[in-house]
Amino acid sequence: MATDFKSIPIIDISPLVAKCDDPERVQDPDVLEVVGQLDQACREAGFFYVKGHGIPDSLIKDVKNVTRKFFDLPYEEKLKIKLSAAAGYRGYQRIGENITNGIPDMHEAIDCYREVTPGMYGTLGKIIEGVNQWPHDPPYFKVLMEEYISFCADLSRKIMRGIALALGGSADEFEGERAGDAFWVLRVIGYPGVSSTNGQNAPENDIGCGAHTDYGLVTLVNQDDGITALQHARPSLLKRRKKKS
């Protein structure tokens, strides 16, 4: 159970990233040090920053740049990939369309999920069958995001291997039949500045996203540099601050 904490811990996970698939990893003191830090962070804070994650800085920069360019487009252009049931609820949401605890959130977003083919998850998964909607403007948006997703999915697997070891299990405890066919979600989110939401006709609520607990096993978060935006309301299993486009 999480306790009061003064700061979010920073963990250099490079030893885990480098030796995640090494059969001798559990004998490596550097890997075990990372595992111990993950264990402490998850128990005491529920959040942690990571460095040494292996995602190229150049890719992160390109993803941020292309994201800003998309959200700077006119609404009519962004609505060309409007979220719809036909697309398995993937696509663009305007400001205020996402609802948390019954209150519209003051952000816009592109919702992307693992693409689901007909019958992949049976009747239960029919509602999310479909492919992701990617804008044609800016160019290379789809290529960059799919590369980024691949890196994030691999990083998540490596972090979960460390957490499995921290829990006293085998490194692949969350893989195979138990959880090896992971379903992922990517939300590319844009928050308008306060000045643009607090104008004469602004809605009463100007909260970017209301308090909530993410579903799933691990959340990777990556926000703009120099911006303090997230607030810790209550612990989820794990929240990591890496990149949330």
Image (tube, rainbow, N blue to C red):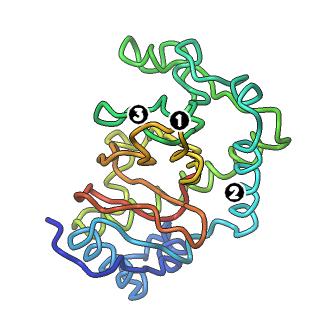
Task: Give coordinates of residue 38: x percent, y percent.
Answer: 33, 73
Residue 64's tag is: 2
- Residue 6's spot in the image, x, y percent? 27, 81
Secondary structure at badge 2 equals: helix
Above or below residue 11? Residue 80 is above
Residue ID for mark 3: 104
Query: Along the horizontal axis of the image, is 27 left or right of 54?
Result: left
Q: Residues within 10 Å of mark 3 (few under 14, many from 20)?
A: many
Judging depth in this view, the residue of 108 and 86 nearest the camera is 108
> Does residue 34 sit above or below 192 in this rendering?
below
How far apart are the alpha carbons under marks 3 and 2? Answer: 25 Å
Per the image, label 3 sits on a secondary structure element best described as strand
Tell me whether circle 3 and circle 2 mark residues in contact (CB < 8 Å): no
Looking at the image, which residue is at 70% across and 49% down? 67
Residue lying furthest front? 200
Q: Which residue is mark 1?
A: 201
